[in-house]
Amino acid sequence: MRTSGFFIEIKTMRKNYKIILIAIVAVFIIIQFFRPAKNLGNITSNHIFEQVKLPSEIKTMITNSCLDCHSNQTNYLWYHEIAPVSWIISSDIKSGKEKLNFSEWGKMNAFDRIGALDNICDEVKSGDMPIEAYVIMHKKARLTEAQRKTLCDWTKKLGEQMIGN
């Protein structure tokens, strides 16, 4: 009699696991219908690429390592379509654009631009930017020490030019 009770308990547990699994799958499917807005603007006259004559190496570094989160033009990959990843990506983009938006460079005053250039160098030199989670999925975004130095040298040079004007 004890063994039959044991088997009934196992059947009940399996049934409960199936119900839980079905609920998880249902929730996963339902959350796919709640998508954040995409960050798909055009490059306008206010974009840094239109405002500043960038050396090609700097333009490539900014494109590969910065623009997805720090502009109005995000290059979305397949996994960006899946919630909750899409929500996390959207939050990261919003946060990045609040700190620096290269698409709004032309709207910034000179002091804010100089401060942004200093911050770019500080973040890149410290290794805080680009963030590691981004670099893991975007291999081209990883900056070498030489690239970090080149980017910092450029930000300092541009900042000095702006002060001189």
Image (cartoon, rainbow, N blue to C red):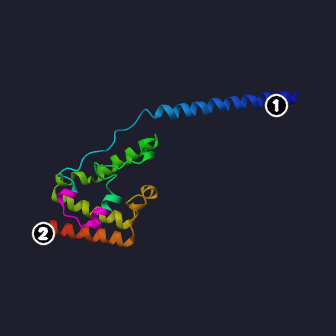
Q: Secondary structure at mark 2?
A: helix
Residue 95 drawn above or below residue 14: below
Magenta stretch, residue numbers:
49-60
Q: Is residue 112 visible?
A: no
* Viewer-nearest residue: 51 or 132: 51
* Viewer-nearest residue: 43 or 148: 43
Q: Main secondary structure of the magenta part?
A: helix
Side of 1 where 164 appears, left or right? left
Q: Amino acid at mark 1?
A: Phe
Q: Which mark is residue 149?
A: none
- Residue 16 placement (x, y as % from top left): 67, 30
Q: Quadrant of the N terminus?
A: top right
- Residue 85 placement (x, y as % from top left): 45, 44
Q: Which mark is residue 164?
A: 2
Question: Magenta span has 55?
Answer: yes
Side of 159 where 10 appears, left or right? right
Q: Secondary structure at mark 1?
A: helix
Where, by quadrant of the figure, is residue 59 drawn?
A: bottom left
Q: Amino acid at mark 2?
A: Gly
Q: Which mark is residue 6?
A: 1
